[in-house]
Amino acid sequence: MTSQRTIATEEDRQYYDTTERVRLKPGWMQGEGQPMPTIEPFLWRWQEVEPLVLKSGELVTPDRDVERRTLRLATPGLDRGTTHTITAALQLLLPGECAPAHRHTPTAIRWVLKGEGAYTTVEGDKCWMEPGDLILTPSWTWHDHNNEGSEPMIWLDGLDVPLVRYLRANFYEPYPEDQQPIVGVAESEKRFASGALRPAWEDHEAPYSPLWHYKWAKTEEALHSLAEIDASPFDDVAMEFSDPATGGPVLRTMTCWAQLIRPGVATRAHRQTSCAVYHVYRGQGYSVIDGQKFEWNEGDFFVVPPWVWHEHANPTGQESILFSIQDIPVLKDMALYREEPYVENAGHQPVTGLFRG
Ligand SMILES: [Fe+2]
Ligand SMILES: [Fe+2]
């Protein structure tokens, strides 16, 4: 049924001229709902990204020219963000550099890609960064990054900026000094990283995980332990980083996953109202997104937009590990989360094209 009307008479024309003048919009003139801006699935190749990230070190310097030296994964069809809710960007910090302390209402995660000898301070807690580590800087927490090592440090930043901007709730404050005072080293880890045990006397009230730092060694061990006994038909050995105080996602607006796709596994397709930004931490394989085959290699990034069929496969003999940032918590909190399995063709989409970028 279409509710759209046309302007047929002089009386109609006068009516619609008047509604426009007094800023009223007849709902029946807008057709069947508004088309949403489309987000295309997309893939960035590390082989193309890495040289540009390293080159950015010659162009701008944090603290002197810019606040942060970042390159955003700019998905076609979007002016901002990497999806409509998540911004993902590569950040480079060279030896001796400091990305000065500040805080903002958007929440951020750091997923460490390369380098050693750098740390992020979150609310006075010094967190040494190593590849595969996940570091949280939740909404309104002070954070600065410092590289005291001898090699370039590269990590993936994931922020809920598009969502926070949409809600007109974006606030920002610089710290008076470049670096905030360090109160302790790995304190959140010492208190909460054991996962199953936490300080008995502490009530944690904050709306995010009290653990800032998830070390790669623990993540890898957890993936291998789960792989011995169970896996999801849609995501294979997928683990969600969890808030040790609640068991829920680490943040209110974003969740992070580490996913082991075992050799020879091809998952079944499904679609969700949530979206995801993926990083290929280890290995090779492919994902079929909306019928298109995206072949990925170690270091690549790709986007799964909301409500498109997607499935992942690892046809190699080595394990593949994917890291992802997803907006599932927002959809679930608003009772808008939906998930649907692809039932035809034993759960696999017909491949209609190959992504070439
Ligand atoms: Fe920041
Ligand atoms: Fe999925």
Image (cartoon, rainbow, N blue to C red):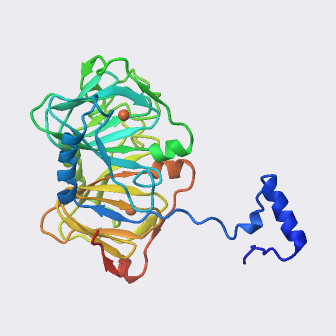
- The number of numbered discs placed on residues in the rendered structure image is 0
Would residue 141 be found to the left or right of residue 333 on screen?
left
The one nearer the camera, 12 or 130, is 12
Spot occupied by residue 37 in the image (x, y as percentages of width and height)? 52, 62
**Which residue sits at x=45%, y=52%?**
328
Q: Quadrant of the N terminus?
A: bottom right
**Which residue sits at x=38%, y=56%?**
276
**Which residue sits at x=34%, y=67%?**
233
Q: Quadrant of residue 321?
A: bottom left
Task: Specify the quarter for ligand 1.
Answer: top left
Spot occupied by residue 303 in the image (x, y as percentages of width and height)? 36, 60
Q: Quadrant of the C terminus?
A: bottom left
Spot occupied by residue 344 in the image (x, y as percentages of width and height)? 42, 81
Vertically, is 254 above or below 19? above
Q: Quadrant of residue 193?
A: top left
Q: Quadrant of residue 116?
A: top left
Would residue 13 be found to the left or right of residue 212 on screen?
right
Would residue 260 be found to the left or right of residue 346 on screen?
left
Vertically, is 322 above or below 142? below
Spot occupied by residue 7 in the image (x, y as percentages of width and height)? 81, 73
